[in-house]
Structures are given as C-alpha cells and as structure tokens.
Amino acid sequence: MFYSPMLLQYAVNNQPYNSPSHVAELKLDGFRLLVSNMDKLKLYTRHNNDVTSKFSELYDSPLSNGTILDGELIVSDQDGKPDFEAMVTRFKSKKSKDKVTFCAFDIIRYKGIDVTSLPLLRRKELLEESFLENDYYKKVKMVEGDTLEYFKLIQQHGLEGIVIKKKDSKYEIDRRSWSWQKVINWTYAEVYITGYRKKDFGWLTSIDTMDGSKRPSGFIEFGVTPEHKKALNSVKHRLTYKEDKSFVYMEPMIKARVKTRNWTKNGMLRSPVLLSLFCDVSAL
C-alpha cells in the first residue's frame, strides 16, 4: 500500500533555530523510501515507483504485518556516513555490491491502523515499538534541546543537514508542510561560467587547478534569475570561442558564487545553486 509522503519546506534563510515545541533529526543523504508490510513487503519511492526487486537485503524484514514506515534509504561509506553517489550507483546498477540500510523516521500504519493523525511524538513512540533494529533496518533518533549546537555538530562532520519538526505535527499525506523544515549544510564555491547548453538550460562551469589551468566542474541549473540570464546574454557573443552540437563554449571571464550540496568524488558540483555573478559583466 502506497501513501504519497509528507514533504519538507526550507527553514527561513536556511537557518536552524531553538524551539521548545520542536525536535531535530539528522537529514540523511539518500533516497526517500516507504516500506509497506501489509499483505506482503513492498518498497516504494516517493513517486510511487515499486522498487522492491532492487533491494533484496530488505526482504528479511523485522516489520510485523500492518506496518508502513517512511524513511531514507542509504549506502554508508567506510566512516559510516551516507554516500549519495554509492546510493545512486546501487539504485541504477545490478553490479554494485554495496548494501543499503533503511532508516525509518516516521510511521504511517501501525498494526494495520492509520496513525497519520497522531502527533509526531506519539508516532515516534509507535515507531520505537514497531520493530527491532538489525543490519538493514534502523531508526532515526530525534534530538531535543539545543538545535543550534546540533547543527554545528552536523557541519563539523560534513553531513547533509537537519530536519526541524513540530512535536505535535500530524503526518500530512501528499503535502509540503511548514511543520517539517530542513536546514542544509551547504558548501560554497566560486566558479567560472565557461559555456552553456544549446537545448535544456544549463551553464557550464570550471574551476582553477593547481597548475593554473581550468577543469570542468559541472552545470548550474538552479537559482538563475531572469536578471542573471540577461547579464550573461549581453556579453556571451563576445566570449564565445567554439561550439558543437550540444554546447557553446566561452572564455572564462565571468565568475559566479554558488552553493552546492557537496563535491562529487570526481570533483563535480552536486546540484549547485547560483547565488550571484561574481563580476560586473557589463564591463566586459
């Protein structure tokens, strides 16, 4: 049985805050997954894709019949941290030998009963009672107290972020709710704009290397305003030096500041968001 999961809002200005009416949880860097054990075990993505066949290690489930859990599916690296790239590889390739772990942070059905109308703290109690942890099924713990200090700890360990949740929040099916707010541990970088796609929107980026050359660092697709586009369009014809059927390439004269989830293992920006153009393009 599938439920369209409750979704998050970004906290205002991406800032954590202390509140006696809220708790915090670690935001795990993986794939959202619903585990349903009604008549039989089923695994669903947030978009209602049945992926049961992909993750055989989850078949030996500790869940009793009538249980539906919401959580994050992760692959852990050698330090025990979620490895998003390894999770993507495992999802796409049958050759990957990495094992997944399902980390449950909420419960939707308990002993066959829909519990979405209960407050979060009561659902957490039911989640705690719903199964015993094993190698492949874990529970995400909530943190009460100093959320600001907790977020500092997350930053120190290079983890993705936190989620701040109202203690009395109901589980809102198929809604993006302010009762759950995410705070992302962004990484910031300065890059060169070195081209653009001809079809789907995307700006090519590069960064400096140790020997002074430039190397590709991925695409900017998010955070680009009409003003940013107008500024680049006004000078791109003067900076273009070649093109092929997919891309137009530009001299690295324009810099930009971006925020990114992190850097991939091969040195690419992961889902970067443009914050500002770093120079006055009108002077070019």
Image: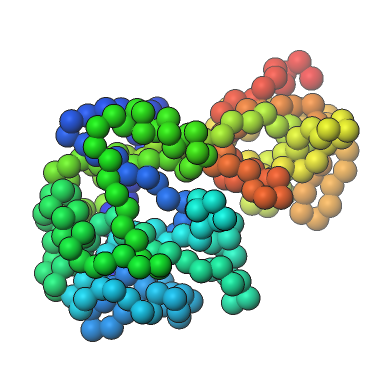
Residue 71: image location, x then y, percent: 34, 59
Question: From the viewer's perspective, is residue 186 above or below residue 30?
Answer: above
Residue 144 in view here: yes
**Residue 144: quarter of image:** top left
Residue 180 in view here: no
**Residue 15: quarter of image:** top left
Q: Nearer the viewer, residue 142 or 44?
A: 142
Residue 27: image location, x then y, percent: 39, 46
Q: How many numbered markers are drawn?
A: 0
Q: Looking at the image, which residue is at 35% across and 28% down?
A: 148
Q: Nearer the viewer, residue 273 or 63?
A: 63
Q: Looking at the image, which residue is at 64% across and 31% down?
A: 189
Q: Nearer the viewer, residue 34 or 177?
A: 34
Q: Nearer the viewer, residue 207 or 62?
A: 62
Q: Quadrant of the N terminus?
A: bottom left
Q: Quadrant of the C terminus?
A: top right
Q: Looking at the image, which residue is at 75% across and 38% down?
A: 206
Task: Specify how the rendered protein is coloured.
Answer: rainbow
102 lies left or right of 128: right
Which residue occupies the extreme bottom position in the image? 39
168 lies left or right of 224: left
266 lies left or right of 47: right
Q: Looking at the image, which residue is at 16% across and 55% down?
A: 125
Question: From the viewer's perspective, is residue 39 above or below residue 206?
Answer: below
Question: From the viewer's perspective, is residue 152 above or below residue 24?
Answer: above
78 lies left or right of 164: right
Residue 26: image location, x then y, percent: 37, 45
Question: From the viewer's perspective, is residue 275 above or below residue 95?
Answer: above
Residue 75: image location, x then y, percent: 50, 61
